[in-house]
Image (tube, grey):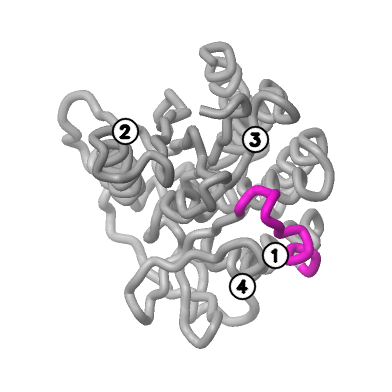
Amino acid sequence: MSETTKVAIACQGGGSHTAFTSGVLQGLLEGFEWETGYELVGISGASGGAFNALAAWYGLVTGDAGKAITILDSLWGDLSADGYSDRLLNSWVRTFNRIEATGLPLPKVSPYQIPGDEMGKERIREVLESHIDFETIPEHCCHNGPKLVVGTVNINAGVFETFVNEDVTVEAVLASAAVPNLFEAVEMNGHLHWDGLFSQNPPVRDLMVQPPDRKPDELWIIQINPQEFEGTPTSTDEIADRRNELSGNISLNQELGFVRRINEWVEDGTLPSENFSKTEIHRIEMGKRFHSSTKLDRDPEFIQELLELGRTQADSFVEER
């Protein structure tokens, strides 16, 4: 391993729960010496994780760790429910999702049946564009800078699709967060895209496909969904929660299985060490379980709780290092 540890960070999606990821990234940016001891060679995200990956990347390539921290923090301040009507709407959505998780029959409405513009999506666009100058992204993509990856799913072809570096547009980020029952699909390149939660959550392989001198020594996963569950989920709430967690983790574990297989092949000599190297995998988990219905909860106090939890978990990770 080189004197400077090359790091790639993958940010799992999970709606509002990814405010936790923002807190983690802020803690990591504050806690490590990125000038000398560590170098970020790539960062990826899906859904809300894509917001955080983009914010951290943009802050770093246009400034420094301090700017990245500022953007991450203010981004979630702007995404939080603000004002009486917005808080009322957020409370209604939270209650509706909680009731739906119990299994009670509720009316279903397609986002295509709602007249007018998609106000939620347009608000996200406005918030993102207030912090990120998307037109300048291509000029900040270079060999020596970190790789940026955003994950979506191509619903026409039925395959994962990632957008890398200069291909990351505001439409790509919105597509990564286009939850099917809330937002219309986003059209790009002649086909439609949905939420990155259905894709590589988060994208990992693209982070590993790097020139030899940019290959990450370590892969840090910021994981939203709990990996393990003790006992048996029996109530409708518990079953719905665990299904949600599993759906978010299955693709992640498949991606990590690919990295582990490469590590095994390097270790047993199947792959030449002069061209391939092992990558250590580390997970930074929430360590606390929240009901899946809160993944759409934008209450400012809840968002702040998640940010602080993220900073706490990041501090523990830094101390362990």
* Crowd tier of the residue under label 1, counting other residues whose Cα lies within 10 Å: few below 14, some 14–19, many 20 or above: some
Q: Closer to the camera: disc 4 or disc 2? A: 2
Label 1 close to label 4 by CB (< 8 Å) = no
Percent x, y for residue 187? 53, 81
* Crowd tier of the residue under label 2, counting other residues whose Cα lies within 10 Å: few below 14, some 14–19, many 20 or above: some
Q: CA distance from mark 1 to mark 3?
A: 30 Å
Q: Earlier in the sequence, mark 1 or mark 2?
A: 1
Q: CA distance from mark 1 to mark 2?
A: 31 Å
Label 4 close to label 2 by CB (< 8 Å) = no
Q: Amino acid at mark 2?
A: Gln
Query: In the drawing, what numbered circle is on residue 118?
Result: 4
Q: CA distance from mark 2 to mark 3?
A: 28 Å
Query: In the drawing, what numbered circle is on residue 227?
Result: 2
Q: Earlier in the sequence, mark 3 or mark 4?
A: 3
Magenta segment = 135-147
Q: Closer to the camera: disc 2 or disc 3? A: 3
Near-viewer residue (260 or 176): 260
Label 1 close to label 3 by CB (< 8 Å) = no
Q: Earlier in the sequence, mark 1 or mark 4?
A: 4
Give SS at disc 1. Answer: helix
Q: Earlier in the sequence, mark 2 or mark 3?
A: 3
Query: In the drawing, what numbered circle is on residue 39?
Result: 3
User: Residue tagged by mark 1?
Assistant: 125
